[in-house]
Image (spheres, helix red, strand yellow):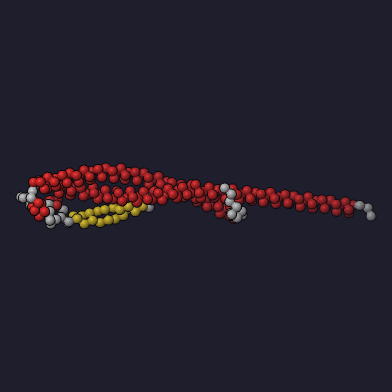
Amino acid sequence: MAATHVNPTRMELTRLKKKLITAVRGHKLLKDKRDELMRQFLDLVRENKALREKVEAGIAAANQNFVLARAGMQDQVLDVALMTPKQEVSLECGNRNVMSVEIPVFTYQTRTSDANDIYSYGFAFTSSDLDAAVKSLADLLPEMLRLAECEKSCQLMAAEIEKTRRRVNALEHVMIPQMQANIKYITMKLDENERSTQIRLMKVKDMMLEEAHHYSEHISEPA
């Protein structure tokens, strides 16, 4: 690749060599970052798959219990039982830095620590299927929050992996080859100029020796 737009000077050659060293080092660091991101991304994908299967199975079981509860209870009784929740959940969202990617971290707290506060009704007029449905949904809450973390983290890490991959490819296939070509071009130009200078100096030396020889012959001739 010809680089005729580059100024073929030794200062430019030194600058390009330093820039090339930095680019090669940055290329290696970016490749290491991309590989580590890919490793953690695959771990998250596997965890996300397992959590999704578990959550979907739990929700399906809870829905089945709700259907059985509705079949065994009057609609008005079921609606009144679930009308006013007894337990409250507060959710906080934080961040965790993973290879310069800010991924979310969810933490939650319940209003009370009593496990039975998830039931907002008495047990006299409700079926055990409703109890099982409410209990299964309460047990699924941590997995659902972790699933939300994993899915959002996968999205953010996938975007960072793609951005890092583009930077690695730009360095590997565009910037580093271009700098190498520019260094080669400048080196050739400097070598060519040095050879031209040496040839001119040799010619000047030959001319000076020839003139000095003719001058000495002229001096040595008898009057």
Left/right placement of residue 75 relative to residue 21 reads left
Q: Where is residue 57 in the image (x, y as percent from the top left)?
A: 21, 43
Name the residue: 64% across, 51% down. Answer: 190
Q: Which residue lies furthest to the right in this view?
A: 223
User: Is residue 9 at all visible to an observer of this figure?
Assistant: yes
- Decide which of 67, 137 is in the foreground and name it: 67
User: Is residue 25 at all visible to an observer of this figure?
Assistant: no
Q: Position of residue 110 (x, y in %)?
A: 18, 55
Name the residue: 8% across, 48% down. Answer: 73
Name the residue: 49% across, 50% down. Answer: 23
Q: In which quarter of the image is the C terminus?
A: bottom right
- Decide which of 65, 111 is in the foreground and name it: 65
Q: Position of residue 203 (x, y in %)?
A: 76, 50
Q: Position of residue 62 (x, y in %)?
A: 17, 46
Name the residue: 8% across, 53% down. Answer: 76
Left/right placement of residue 157 relative to residue 127 reads right
